[in-house]
Image: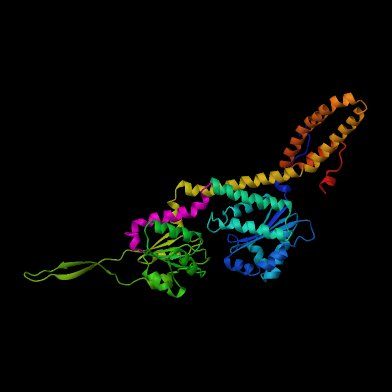
Amino acid sequence: MNFSTAHMDLSGASPASELGLSCLSFDHHSANFALLERIERHTVALTSALGTVHADAPGGAVILATCNRFEAYFDQAPGAPERALQEVAALSGISVAELASAARMLRGIDVAHHLFSVTSGLESMVVGEGEISGQVRRALSNARRAGATTPTLEQLFQRAAGVSKDVKRRTRVQTRGRSLVRLALFLAESRVGDWGGTRILLIGTGAYAAATLAALRDRGAAHIAVHSPSGRAETFAAARGVRAISPEDLESELAAADIVIACSTAQDPLIDVPLIERTVTPTARPYCTALIGRAPGGSATPFSVTTPPRPRLFIDLGMPRNIAPDAAQISGIELLDLDIVARHAGVEELSAEAEARKIASDAAQEFAAAQAERDTVPTVRALHEHVHAVLADELARLRGNPAASELLEPALRHFAGRLLHQPTLRIRELGRAGNADAADAAVRALFPVSDPDQHAA
């Protein structure tokens, strides 16, 4: 039997169009941190409400809420993102217009691509950070406990975990942050005579801060203090044997530091121009002392030769910026930021993220195709049941002749299997291409099969 599609109308179909997935997303790419903070205050209520926003449909929902992300993933819930937006507005007190301007609504394969990228750390403020994968896993667990998942959501989130592992195994994107830290310190070495005697102020307590501290210690740095705008400096410092700086002491520590390294995820600059200007010493310190002016039979007169002090180095690894860019214009201050570091990055560092994004994109395409193939299961089942029903009739007729039945039954069953093999493969291929309906129509036109929807129910 030739299951050619030459005479089938397969136009306009695609695997992506068959996915019933949708997503409402607020994150640091689309929304400012003030808005995200306002949403975060209502996370518990929103998670409960959005988990039932699909109650009138046989769908599901998974809510992902982090410090800089709030997302709701839906399955088989038409219009859910729009209704969810209204729910967020009602519970948070934020206007629909303000929320709509900061929201992204995704559907179909775009949902899979987005979640795979999120879980792999590609949408995080620190690209490649690994904490988000655990947060995604917990979001699925919470939805399971609430009875809000569907088979498709289960498969989507489980595949996202697999993609995250693939990205970690096949690329260096999760070491990208550490690579940039090492490169920044390498660029700073020409300004540092002795790391052991250099006074360093580290601002931040996240992934970049931990990587920076490790890299500094590898270079022999011993005088390191840490400040955190989030108030976590004490915990971070105690666990790592460095000195914590309170907000009240920040200005004096800035004045004393030879190098300031900022790597916080705060939205606005933590170190502005007025703050830096207050820490700049207006007079130069003596750089060396010489003995000159010796008179015959007399003693030398000490004479101090002063030179401008070596510029203090500010390294900004924050995303967004932690240090005001205009700081570079202040006399005695040298600013090294991510733009400068990236220009010195090697091909490997720059290509790691692109490679990881391709893995996520390819996985999303495969997920959509696999989901579309599952749509052909009722059709394949109906075709198999029809052929096996015909086979059963023939075997019943042969059972009147035991000798013939014993010889022919295995052969007929084998024949039925071979007869079904190629059509089954072709139906699944059509499904992966988004043409499950066309395959179903072809089977029902050729065979008196039952309605596949009865089997899917």
Q: Residue furthest bottom?
A: 248
Q: Range of the magenta residues?
A: 171-198
Q: Is residue 408 above or below residue 326?
A: above
- Percent of width and height locating residue 182: 43, 54
The N terminus: image quadrant? top right
Q: Is residue 334 left or right of residue 366?
A: left
Residue 228 makes an appearance in the image: no
Q: Is residue 222 above or below residue 169?
A: below
Q: Is residue 455 above or below residue 419?
A: below
Q: Residue furthest right?
A: 400
- Percent of width and height locating residue 323: 45, 65
Residue 407 sits inside the magenta stretch: no
Q: Is residue 14 above or below residue 221?
A: above
Which one is nearer the viewer's eye here, 39 or 170?
170
Residue 182 sits inside the magenta stretch: yes
- Percent of width and height locating residue 30: 60, 60
Residue at 86% in and 26% down: 406
Residue 234 makes an appearance in the image: yes
Q: Which quadrant would residue 76 be assigned to in this image? A: bottom right
Q: Which quadrant would residue 187 be assigned to in this image? A: bottom left
Q: Looking at the image, what colour scheme do you see?
A: rainbow
Q: Which quadrant would residue 91 be assigned to in this image? A: bottom right
Total tally of numbered discs in the picture:
0
Residue at 72% in and 56% down: 149
The secondary structure that dominates the magenta segment is: helix
Residue at 33% in and 63% down: 197
Residue at 76% in and 36% down: 424
- Percent of width and height locating residue 101: 64, 63
Which one is nearer the viewer's eye here, 135 or 255?
135
